[in-house]
Image (cartoon, rainbow, N blue to C red):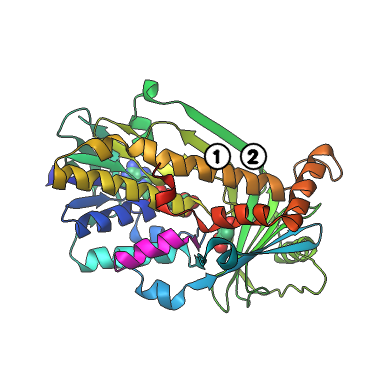
Amino acid sequence: MKKIKTQVGIIGAGPAGLTLAHWLKRNGISSVILELRSREYVEGRVRAGLLEQNTVDIMNDLGLADRLKKEGIEHDGVNLSFDSERVHIPFAELTGGRKITIYGQQEVVKDMTDAWLDADEELYFEAGASEIVDFDTKNPKIHFKHAGEDGILECDFVAACDGFHGVGRKTMPKDNYRSYDITYPFSWLGILANVAPSTDELIYAYHENGFALHSLRSETVSRLYVQVPNGESPDDWSDDRIWSELSTRLATPGFELKAGPIFDKSITPMRSHMIDNLSSGRLFLAGDAAHIVPPTGGKGLNLAIADVKHLVDGLVSFYKHNSTDDIDNYTQMALRRIWRAQDFSNFMTTLFHKQEEHGSYNYKLQKAKFDYLKMSKASRTTIAENYVGLPFETYEY
Ligand code: APR
Ligand code: PHB
């Protein structure tokens, strides 16, 4: 039986777990990370790639942004299309200079994993946590299995950063929280293609055939998505069909979509999941373990990093100032931003996806919301400030 001891036991080496580990280290607090999957799997997992200003600032402060600064692509605005009409939302002008950066989530994970292991810190891959016990005492323990051997990680606090299917949320006493779930009746088919992006800034588009999003990863790699009915498989979508649908849905006068070889295709379900309490005793949930938002607006990764900020505040007050005030406030602080993001993600999803038939009452409401964007700077500002992410101070009321 392998026995390890640390101050904070972290489950999950995704963006939430890795950011937490680095940030705690910066404050002299030790942690050990357990990760169910292999390093290759985690670093190869294709996810979204939109970093809010706050997220980039945190990576910078933690000394983890060298490659991000070189390879990340800063965007000062976003394009929103509806029935072939396009509105540009200039972030810098509407938010006092804030922006977003496009940089793949798996690149963030690679950079943080490299830095953690280079510093000789502990991270066990293929080490699935099976049980979290004694979290209602001062000595919680995480049971795990690594390389065929059972192990116990003893710690002062458990941070479950183990995603939607992890063990953290399942361990929370059921009478401790209320949960909220929405499953949208459509999914995203996402592709990566070896072709120069046909746009400098992202395009979100409503079309009567369904939603489309043009994003990118580099000067030579494009990332695009189309709305598909639930239950479809990537095999139902030939490359030709994908490009043809994308070019129909993204069409606006003067815009031409460049097609190229597709090297990754995957389906993402669209759901919202919330619980209204993120801790029990000394067990704390952060990131996808605590909440899921639909990907429209790219909030998932950024919310995970924001949770970690509040958790670090709490743990630093505990270890450095012997105070439990901030850690006791973790849920309350984190939930303000999470609900804001739930609302924004739901707003973007319902505005740009085809839900009922073209011309229905619902469609007319979508169109009215889009037309309002054209008329009102206030409406454009609402989108801009939510999209780039509100500063942390905004939530400290
Ligand atoms: N033991 C150890 N690790 C586990 C366990 C377990 N029992 N269960 C899950 N994990 C690992 C997963 O393999 C995964 O690597 O926890 C990690 C959770 O990472 P993410 O799913 O990336 O979640 P998070 O760090 O919260 O980041 C949120 O990821 O899903 C996207 O859209 C989401 O961008 C957002 C971001
Ligand atoms: C992405 O680049 O993968 C991306 C961008 C914006 C989104 C979702 C995904 O809203």
Count neighbours of disc 1 (C-alpha within 10 A) and say few if under 14, some if 14 to 19, many if 20 or more.
Answer: some
Quadrant housing the N terminus: top left
Contact flag, marks 1 and 2 (Cβ < 8 Å): yes
- Which numbered dot is residue 298? none
Type of the residue with mark 1? Ser
Look at 36% across and 36% down and name the residue there.
Answer: 331
Q: Looking at the picture, does residue 76 appear above or below residue 295?
A: below
Q: Looking at the picture, does residue 339 appear above or below residue 34?
A: above
Type of the residue with mark 2? Tyr
Q: Looking at the picture, does residue 8 appear above or below residue 225?
A: above
Is 65 within the magenta?
Answer: no
Q: Secondary structure at mark 1?
A: strand
Report which residue position mark 1 lands on.
Answer: 272
Residue 249 at x, y = what percent? Answer: 77, 60
From the viewer's perspective, tell me whether residue 203 is left or right of residue 73. Answer: right
Is 53 within the magenta?
Answer: yes
Q: Which residues are magenta?
A: 50-63
From the viewer's perspective, tell me whether residue 114 is left or right of residue 265. Answer: left
From the viewer's perspective, tell me whether residue 162 is left or right of residue 360. Answer: left
Look at 61% across and 58% down and name the residue there.
Answer: 190
Q: Looking at the picture, does residue 71 appear above or below residue 391?
A: below
